[in-house]
Amino acid sequence: MSEERTRFSDDELEEFRVIIDAKLAEAKEDLELLTSTMSHKDDNGTDDTSPTFKLVEDGGDVMSREETAQLALRQQKFIKHLEDALNRIRNKTYGICRVTGKLINKERLKVVPHATLSIEAKNAQQG
């Protein structure tokens, strides 16, 4: 009779840490790109164009900036979730469903490494 594991092994936690570190580096790069886009470091503005064209362009520019700001906020939230996952790895509580207390499927964690719910708990939450 096999007993159910209550946590991932240190080797498994290290494997997840590597995955999360890579995703975190990529997410921070993406956030930096979004932030620089919002601050117009590479500004190709409409200051020297006709007033009518400038008005149309500036309206589109405001919309684009708002969308970029929303993307940046989502990216910041994603980074926070990844950092929280790294803390759970350090605490050796990573991969434990916060609802059922059981281990989350490894394949799920490889795809969504910041997950805190098992598929069963996620489905029950949505149902």
Image (cartoon, rainbow, N blue to C red):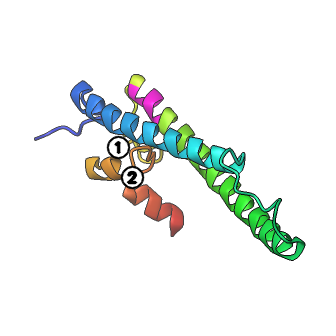
Residue marked by disc 2: 118
Boundaries of the magenta span: 85-89
Residue 87 sits inside the magenta stretch: yes
Question: Mark 2 touching mark 1, by CB under 8 A?
Answer: yes
Q: Main secondary structure of the magenta part?
A: helix
**Above or below, comparing residue 121 to residue 3 in the picture:** below
The residue drawn where x is 87% and y is 76% is 52
Drawn side of residue 55 relative to residue 107, left or right: right
The residue drawn where x is 70% and y is 51% is 43
The image quadrant that residue 50 belongs to is bottom right
The residue drawn where x is 72% and y is 45% is 39
Drawn side of residue 4 relative to residue 54, left or right: left
The residue drawn where x is 44% and y is 50% is 117
Report the mark closest to the observer, 2 or 1: 2
State the SS at label 2.
loop
Residue 102 is marked as 1
Residue type at mark 2 is Ser
Place of residue 48 in the rendered image (x, y in percent of width and height, measured from the top left): 82, 61
Q: Can residue 61 be seen in this view?
A: yes
